[in-house]
Image (cartoon, helix red, strand yellow):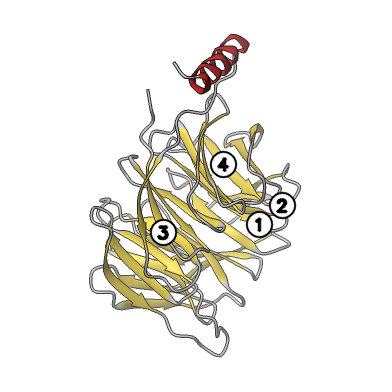
Amino acid sequence: MTHGKMVVGLVMAVLVVLGVQAPTAQAQEKATLKGHTSFVWSVAWSPDGKTLASASADGMVRLWDPATGKEKAALKEKATLEKLERDIHSVAWSPDGKTLALESAGYTVKLRNSAAGKEKATLKGHTDSVVSVAWSPDGKTLASGSWDKTVKQWDAATGKDKATLKGHTQHVLSVSFSPDGQTLASGSWDGTVKLWDPATGKEKATLTGHTRGVESVSWSPDGKTLASGSEDSTVKLWEAATGKERTTLKGHKSNVLCVAWGPDGKTLASGSWDHTIKLWDVAAGNELATLKGHTNEVFSVAWSPDGKTLASGSTDKTVKLWDVRRRK
């Protein structure tokens, strides 16, 4: 045994004696998907796991084959007088996989056929940039969060504005439906997370505790816990039923820009301004691994439906795929 291995062994032994769980071995990078010419803001898996979508500041949504890493299609958005930069901040698949929702130019949301890429509808009503979109579990409603400080709910079939949820005092940066569709969560630059009743549009609770803006919110698969990532460099876990804070996960060195639960409900991923992705053991509140490879901020993370692969999008203009199967 080399001196280095002896030192590592002694450190691990001390951690065990002290009851401290050390992070597991780092997850392995599987592939880097290149093609975007500007920042990658959002990544999303199709429900069947056979396609990955990425949205970028280059005005493109690219569809990738995760098995081969090859690009399958590219959907282009045009700039408008209201939005010259063409940024697409968010993309989301409908539960049936047939429709892509994406933030588009002119403060709108567009629905596009995922197979042909043809536009199905343009949802107009926001008065500033839309930066987050999310589908209800039944696919009948789409939610959007905007810099205009509001959340809107849209009828996915007709494209009509069903409700405007007002209460945040700063930009709404993230929206997410609970798995049962009974609660809509929103995170804002005002440092709060709000829970809404989608049926009535009324606010159910305001979760406070972050000291800076909330960049991302994500529900656990069982709907009992909500995770929030903040510019205060922390991830917080909240009890959905009571609104009480369960725990705070600390480890990132800068803003937490995105959070996403693994399908097993045991693991949470977070991406940060510090260029890293962290995997967390939710029950223990411990860090499992730090994924390093991006050379700039990580703005989006998304788990494959089978939980074996994590996708990440970064301002380094790339999408990365990681093998995140938990080590025994």
Q: Give the label on residue 227, or none.
A: 4
Whole-Å distance between the Cαs marked 4 and 3? 23 Å
In this rendering, is residue 327 above or below 91?
A: above
Q: Quadrant of the N terminus?
A: top left
What residue does disc 2 label? 191
x and y, in percent, of residue 151 in the image: 58, 63
Left or right for 277, reference 118: right
Q: What's the residue type where badge 2 is placed? A: Gly
Q: On the rendered structure, is 54 left or right of 225?
A: left
Seen at 31% across and 56% down, the residue is 46
Any mark on residue 319, and which? 3
Is residue 31 placed above or below 127 in the rendered structure? Answer: above
Question: Would you name the residue on which mark 1 appears?
Answer: 188
Depth order, front residue of 26/141: 26
Q: Earlier in the sequence, mark 2 or mark 3?
A: 2
Q: Is residue 139 visible?
A: no
How many marks overall? Answer: 4
Q: Earlier in the sequence, mark 1 or mark 3?
A: 1
Q: Nearer the viewer, residue 267 or 314?
A: 314
Q: Amino acid at mark 1?
A: Ser
